Amino acid sequence: MAIIIEAKNLMKNYSEDETETPALQGVSLTIKEGEFVAIMGPSGSGKSTLLHILGFLDRPTGGEYIFAEKNMNNYSDDELAAIRNKKMGFVFQAFNLLPRTTVHDNVKLPLMYSHAAESHWESMTKKAITSVGLEHRINHESSQLSGGEKQRVAIARALVNDPSVIFADEPTGNLDSKSGGQVMEILQKLHDEGKTIVLITHETYTAEYAQRIIRLKDGLLDTDLQVATRRRANNRFIK
């Protein structure tokens, strides 16, 4: 499989009142197309900062980031936004849904900023909603949904443009164990269908769905890339 994500000595410093705080201190890693990778670490370890850089939501202070063989430094912010909309999907702990808007319109929203033909928006929206099993809630407002359903809507919204990579930042953090398991099973299914999944988590049970675990501590790789057992919906484990 080809390498889709390559980070070389990534650095990120935050400045406040003439004081610099390092968030990343030279992180290097690669992720191949179709992999399911979990990034773990305690609060303040730099894992969300790393995801924001990998997802073109922020720029590093130093080092290089190469996505799909193209260097991030060669693009303007507008070009990065276009690639992010087309090639990347995001799922966050807080769902980030519009509360008085239907499931249908929440999922359709990214298409309004894409190059997809408007004549295809309806079929693309319904396909994404069906993929997470919420077609029966398509006309409900997001405020009427349970936490688990909201996160499934967020996943559908992340999928609507058929991205290459799904970035999931603590996607089960606001959910009970049953709902969290359902969300992870959806991510597992997407991986089985060929999507690259990059998961940020502090929870061992969610990380166990991944093929590899990358551990961060104080902005550094805590250990080399590690092979993780992978948990499937039928509760069997494989290496």
Image (cartoon, rainbow, N blue to C red):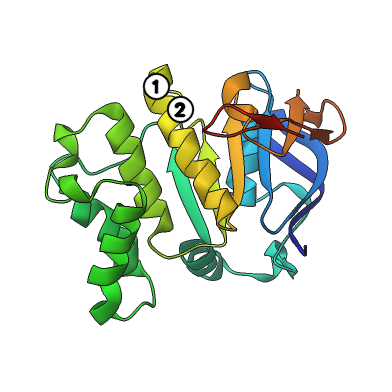
- Pointer 2: residues within 10 angstroms few (<14), some, or many (20+)? some
Q: Are marks 2 and 1 in contact (CB under 8 Å)?
A: yes
Q: Is residue 230 left or right of residue 151?
A: right
Q: What x and y, as percent, mark residue 130?
A: 30, 54
Above or below: residue 155 compared with residue 80: above
Q: Position of residue 132 (x, y in %)?
A: 35, 47
Residue name at image x 52 percent, y 36 percent: 169
Q: Which amino acid does label 1 sit on?
A: Lys
Q: Which residue is denoted by mark 2 in the rendering?
A: 181
Q: What residue type is labelled 2?
A: Gly
The secondary element bearing badge 2 is classed as helix
Q: In which quarter of the image is the N terminus?
A: bottom right
Near mark 1 (Cα within 10 A), the count class, few <14, some 14-19 or many ≥20, is: few
Query: Which residue is pictured at 78% across the width and 45% down the height?
Result: 10
Residue at 63% x, 29% y is: 236
Mark identifier at residue 178: 1
Give the distance between the C-alpha atoms of the residues marked 2 and 1, in whole angstroms.
5 Å
